[in-house]
Image: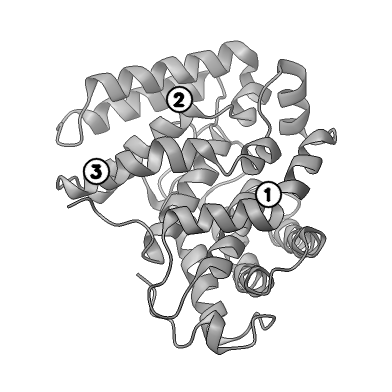
Amino acid sequence: MIALACTPAAADPAAGDAPWARAFGRAATLALYDELALSPKPGLVTLQDSGSHADMDAQTFLRSLFALRGYFGQIAGLGARGAAFAELERCGRQAEQRMLAATGGINTHRGAIFSLGLVCAAAAAAWRPDRGCDAAAVRARLLSHWGAALRQRALRPSPRPGGLAAARHGLRSASAEAALGFPALFDTVLPAYQAELGAGAALASARRRALFRLILALDDANLAHRGGLEGLRFARAAAAGYLATHGVHDDEEQHAARAIGRAFVARRLSPGGAADMLAVLCFLQRIGVVQAAA
């Protein structure tokens, strides 16, 4: 859990360089590293391999993380003062340009800039000096502050590959998922993750299961872009089989995850949307929102 030197209530909320905002930014950046470091995971870049990606590796991700390190503190400051969604979008677009400059035009974290940035802003808006915040408060701030703007954004066609795939196949876009308050994360994955940690699961095992639950629950446009509906269905079936067969204390679960990873690579599948939401889960844990069940 992060230690805030001061809180949004005790500092200028517009200042992205305030100590509390830097703490939120550090937690978000570390959460992206948490996602990168988790291994094995199917089709995604890790510290050991590039998964289904021929154009990026761990070093590409680390350059991106370095470029984004100030963004999350900035968007936390905007969130704490209830800035309009247009300001959050502007901040995100600037961060995206820094990311692309650092990676030579490779999209490593565009989805995380959106999803993790929004949750970082909402958490800053919900934070209270005496008690921090909980998951319900973060979600409530997200919906009350920016839900209407997100619903409007979801109606606009996106020219990006994931958005085009979502529209082509009738899937819920990232904007639509955000406009609903990220139900796959908050309703499905977060409670199970907390329960598994409370039952003594190893952190890596619990996070891997969270990733597979996200693959199962999300309309992951990255999977649809790379493999069409057939690829999305294959990924969901693999995730369902893994969750049904392997528990958190199963010595074979890593072998099973590696086998699924090989199948994903053979089909060029990469669950980037699920990875983005796993980073959000790691962020919530780093700021103390995720608590192990009693």
Query: From what the image shows, is residue 162 above or below residue 68?
Result: above
Percent from the top left, x then y, of residue 149?
77, 49
Within 10 angstroms of label 3, few (less than 14), some, or many (20 or more) residues? some
Residue tagged by mark 1?
A: 110
Percent from the top left, x then y, of residue 19?
53, 86
Secondary structure found at label 1: helix
At label 1, the amino acid type is Arg
Decide if residue 45 is in sight here. no
For the image, the number of numbered tags is 3
- Asked if residue 7 lies left or right of residue 158, the reply is left
Secondary structure found at label 3: helix
> Do labels 1 and 2 touch, CB within 8 Å?
no
Q: CA distance from mark 1 to mark 3?
A: 30 Å
At label 2, the amino acid type is Leu
Q: Residue at x 37, y 38 (%)?
A: 210
Residue tagged by mark 3?
A: 195
Secondary structure found at label 2: helix
- Looking at the rendered image, the disc whose residue lies closer to the viewer, 1 or 3, is 3
Decide if residue 53 is in sight here. yes
- Asked if residue 257 lies left or right of residue 223, the reply is left
Image quarter of the N terminus: bottom left
Residue tagged by mark 2?
A: 216
Any mark on residue 192, and which? Answer: none
